[in-house]
Image (cartoon, rainbow, N blue to C red):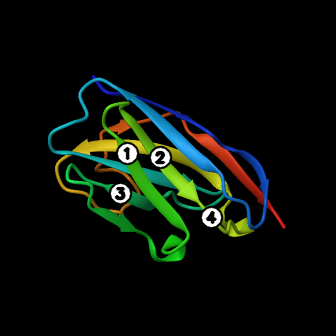
Amino acid sequence: QVQLVESGGGSVQAGGSPRLSCQASGYTRGSFCMAWFRQAPGKEREGVATIDSVSSTTYTDSVKGRFTISKDNAKNTLYLQMNSLKPEDSGMYSCAARIGFCTVRTAGSIYNYWGQGTQVTVSS
């Protein structure tokens, strides 16, 4: 059983650079894909970034060049460094995991494991 716990959210001003963390427990090595999703009020959940077992990454277009996904296998921790935040980046950010290939082009139904989420609110 994989458990995921996010931290690092909060209220930030536009242009800020917070870092989200996701502590994983249980087996997340091997062919696991780790991902960050977000959901704004009234909007569908969207994939933000993914990182696979060999640390290949993908990003949704709106965050390319601003966000960086990474992981520390020794600490079993996934990160999302967010730079140059915009108000439209606000939402509930959740980490997720699945066994198999990575994709960011999904609302998340193919991901098997989810954290509880951490809220990020960006003010202008």
Q: Nearer the viewer, mark 2 or mark 3?
A: 2
Give neighbour class at mark 3: few <14, some 14-19, many 20+ (Cα, 10 Å): many
Q: Amino acid at mark 2?
A: Tyr
Position of residue 114 relative to residue 58, above or below, is: above
Residue 29 is left or right of residue 121, and the answer is: left
Could you say whether the residue bearing mark 1 is in a helix, strand or loop?
Answer: strand
Q: Amino acid at mark 3?
A: Thr
Q: Tell me whether the residue at label 2 lies in contact with that at label 3, contact meaning CB atoms closer than 8 angstroms.
A: no
Could you say whether the residue bearing mark 2 is in a helix, strand or loop?
Answer: strand
Q: Nearer the viewer, mark 3 or mark 1?
A: 1
Residue 79 is left or right of residue 71, and the answer is: right
Q: In the rendered image, which quarter contains the N terminus?
A: top left
Q: Which mark is residue 83?
A: 4
Rounded to the nearest angstrom, the CA distance separating label 4 from label 1 is 17 Å
Q: Tell me whether the residue at label 4 lies in contact with that at label 1, contact meaning CB atoms closer than 8 angstroms.
A: no
Rounded to the nearest angstrom, the CA distance separating label 3 from label 1 is 10 Å
Q: Which residue is mark 2?
A: 79
Give neighbour class at mark 2: few <14, some 14-19, many 20+ (Cα, 10 Å): many
Q: Amino acid at mark 4?
A: Asn
Rounded to the nearest angstrom, the CA distance separating label 2 from label 3 is 11 Å
Rounded to the nearest angstrom, the CA distance separating label 3 from label 4 is 17 Å
Q: Amino acid at mark 1?
A: Lys
Q: Position of residue 102 (x, y in %)?
A: 25, 57
**Res. 38 image quadrant:** bottom right
Residue 124 is left or right of residue 88, and the answer is: right
Could you say whether the residue bearing mark 3 is in a helix, strand or loop?
Answer: strand
Q: Tell me whether the residue at label 1 lies in contact with that at label 2, contact meaning CB atoms closer than 8 angstroms.
A: yes
